Image (cartoon, rainbow, N blue to C red):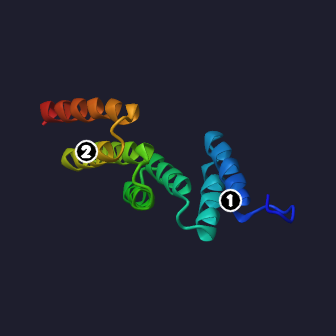
Amino acid sequence: ADSAGGVSKLDSLDAWYNQAVTLQGDSKTGTAESLYVRILREDSSYTFALNNLGAIYAARGELDSAIQYYTRALDKKHDMPEAYANLVRVYIARKEFAQARRWLVKGQGHNPDSQLLKEIQKTVGDSARVYERKK
């Protein structure tokens, strides 16, 4: 709250974000998407809204849109292992393993201690091997 006792813009964006996360968790992704878009209209650098919009699009199979939102989040905040992991997953889904590895390396460079990125590294290798065997 600001000194006048009102709610700051950031507080309301955070409240909308928390509401959107709850909706997304309850599979109400259309409503969550609308809230994330509303947040980004107010603050285009709200990285968690960018990342979560990417997740909604990835879940729908709209992988180009997912990539766009994940990379926008990373342009604003380089030390966001969740966005790197999500981007790597999209490239795995597209069977673009060189791109998956590229983003993994970049993510690990910015987040060397990230357990999430250590775990996804194994996924990249396993997925690439399975794909190569099927070819």
Q: Is 65 in front, or is 82?
A: 82
Q: Is 43 in front, or is 109?
A: 109
Which residue position is annotated with label 1?
13
Picture coordinates of residue 113, whole percent (x, y): 36, 35
Which residue position is annotated with label 2?
105
33 left or right of 123?
Answer: right
Pick out the residue farthest to the bottom.
41
**Height in image: 60 above or below 40?**
above
Which amino acid does the dot numbered 2 rest on? Answer: Val
Which residue is pictured at 37% across the width and 59% down the height? 64
Badge count: 2
Which residue is pictured at 23% across the width and 29% down the height? 126
The C terminus sits in image quarter = top left
Determine which quarter of the picture holds residue 13.
Answer: bottom right
73 left or right of 107?
Answer: right
Q: CA distance from mark 2 to mark 1?
A: 32 Å
Picture coordinates of residue 106, whole percent (x, y): 28, 49
Picture coordinates of residue 83, whole percent (x, y): 42, 48
**Height in image: 115 above or below 60?**
above
Which residue is pictured at 14% across the width and 35% down the height? 132
The N terminus sits in image quarter = bottom right
Picture coordinates of residue 131, whole percent (x, y): 19, 35
Which residue is pictured at 23% across the width and 49% down the height? 102
Pick out the residue farthest to the right.
5
**How dense is the environment of label 1, judged by Cα within 10 Å: few (below 14), some, or many (20 and up)?**
many
Determine which quarter of the picture holds residue 14.
Answer: bottom right
Callout 1: SS? helix
Which amino acid does the dot numbered 1 rest on? Answer: Leu
**Height in image: 40 above or below 125?**
below
